[in-house]
Image (cartoon, grey):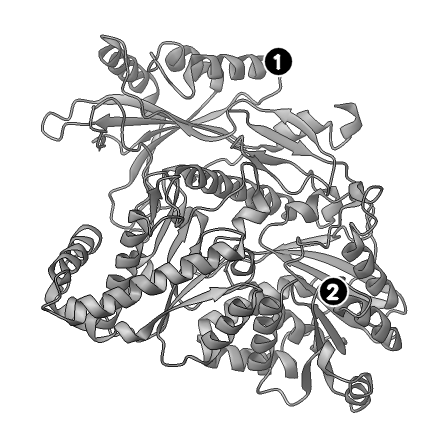
Amino acid sequence: MNNKIELTEINSENKGSLISNIKIDGFHSTKMISQLSFSRGNKTAIHIFNNAKQAAAYFANPKLPLSSSKILCLGKVQSGKTAFFISSIALAFDNGFDLCVIFGGTKNALLDQTFERLEKDFYNNEKVRVALLKSVAPLQIKQWINEGLKVILVVLKNVSSLNSNLYEANTILGDYAKIPTIIIDDESDEHTPGAPLLKSKNPRAGITHDVIDEIIQIFSNVTMMFVTATPQANLLLSTIDSLTPDYAVLIEAGDDYTGGDAFHDISSNKHVVEIADTDDFRASIPESFKQAYAFFLIATSVMHFRKNNEQFSMLVHPSGLTRVHRNVVEKMTEGLDDYKVVLKEKNHPAHNEYKRFLLETYTNNFSQDFNFDDIFLVLTSKLDHYKVYEYNTTIEGKRSIEERNYDKNIKYKIFVGGNMLGRGVTLPNLCVTYMYRDAKVSAIDTLYQRARWMGYKKKYFDICRVYMTKDLKEKFIAIADSERDLWVSLNEFLATQIDLKAFTRIFTLPHEKLMLTRKTVSKTIVLERVKPGYTYDRSLAFRQGDVELNNVVLEDFLRKYGSSGKIISFSTSGTQNHLLIEARFTDIYNDFLFNYNFPRNSKIGPLTFRKIYSQVIDGTLEDEINVVVMRYPEGQYRSTNFQGTTLMELPQGYDSGSGYPGDKHLVFNKNSMQLQIHMVYVNKETKDIIPLLAFDNPMTSHTIRYATGDAFYDNI
């Protein structure tokens, strides 16, 4: 597997003059906090506004005759980016801006969802008017502004014809060129960065980029906010491009957020269930889907006993083809009808078989907090509250979407679709996802946007499941690692600098079937790094006597270095205690790694550390490392596969109950390599220790300087 870093050129030019003395307690901000406190609680409202204040620090100064600012706003998937930019609009209105234009995505479903949120959150504000550009007369806009009202116009990011939304905006907005304006580009990585490399072959490629650029140029005073969870295309756009961001803010998720670290930390995460590559709906409903279906039925019934009467959703991603959606919807509806008939009739020949299958699902997947017969009784009484919806652009799909909006009595909704159920769409309390559609090579930004299962789910996280193929599961683990690297590097950069053009565009690609974004956005340089990110061994295929020898090596190591280390507790329960030793890499290599005998099919092996040793000697890497003896001194139990040749998993994942971040996410000195020594035992009675290693080679400032020559990429 090749692990790559991708780089693009940068330009440190910085444009625009920023607003000073941000007003944070004005009329519009006060109204917004009041509305958010009412709908989400005071703590959440304050958290959202604290994020919005970050963006306000980079607003262009509306008092200057000419001023512009472009801000990249990076949040995580389903983490509350809409609430963030709506709050940012309120702050903008209090600080001299009179007009807001929102590019509400490329699909009507997302546009309508955004419009509804705006109407809801500005409901208590009589001084703001919200309108769809396609539905409001230009004279009405002018009248509102003349009356001293603030105006929000929502536009579909569409250039399919000269009458489409962006072209219309380009025509109408010319009348408001002198009005200080804030533009929000929701899902800004989609189409906005353009495709300049295709223009010679396809004259329509990149038109969205060009029209948005023309709209920005209309205004003498404008702030542009690029909002996204997957900024690869925005960052890989040439830094001399007109739409490259000047600044960046990280939109921190709230405490109850469950994202990539919660679902995709390790391959054995119980919330992600592996299905076979052959599980499709061509001939019949696959067995794995029957299990997912049964899980959803049981899960929603369990929530009834927890006194949670909210709506819950299930999402099925079978294909990008609408004819496949129709086939799946028909089969699923038939399956739901079968449940209604069979479960309600105790004398039905299949009744006991269906009930036994549901009991098995309950026993294998849920804590036994409630009596199954009670669960079953509730389930059978509520079967009319479940319905399957087709979610696409066909006539049937559009009709189904309308039904979804009006079916108020349907509490448990199952959505079947493709691209329309991707980026930006929020489904109420999505708890079960079934997904097997994927390309051979996936763009990180496109694939990660399909992760609708992430969000604020801690109160029902135990009933959340994602069913996907092994290949998809591995890709999402890799993407979650890549996201972590990007957030760490951006956070470190923003602590010292503000001009985003000076940020070195370096990303990790820890999977050979992933690419950062569509290749048309930017031409990149590729560098190889030695085992970037967190890598670990699970193999127990040691040669005879190696385990015993490794224990002696470990004892010698602890005898020499143990006294210089310190024990750190990482959990509130006191169960996650690790011994941290800070040392020089060359010393650890000579005193431990050189003597350690790796398993035969090791992922890291002696060659990895030999390469790193040579890079430390020649100055490519700094001579420092954190060694962490995990769960010291008791060690840890790990189960094995049936043959006893491989651990089911080595690292322990995130634990919300004890606050443990997970073995992968232990951060000490962010610029140092980290070697974890796991003292594993597979027999709970004898507790015979098997030392196994995990290694984290982070993207460090030293590595970046070495690779880029302080950002002079033409010297590589």
Residue 393 lies, with reference to residue 207, above or below; the image says: below
Residues 470 and 262: in front is 470
* Figure quadrant of residue 707: top right
Q: Residue placed farthest to the right in the image?
A: 65
Task: Give the SS element for disc 2.
Answer: loop
Residue type marked 2: Phe
The residue that mark 1 highlights is 618
Which quadrant does the C terminus fall into? top right
Task: Give the SS element for disc 1.
Answer: loop
Q: Is residue 25 left or right of residue 253?
A: right
* Figure quadrant of residue 357: bottom left
Mark 2 or mark 1, which is nearer the start of the sequence?
2
Across and down, in percent, residue 686 comes to 11, 25
Residue 339 lies, with reference to residue 488, above or below; the image says: below
Identify the residue shown where x is 53% and y is 81%.
Answer: 35
Across and down, in percent, residue 506 comes to 64, 36
Residue type marked 1: Asp
- Residue 59 is tagged as 2
Across and down, in percent, residue 327 comes to 43, 57
Across and down, in percent, residue 6 comes to 65, 33
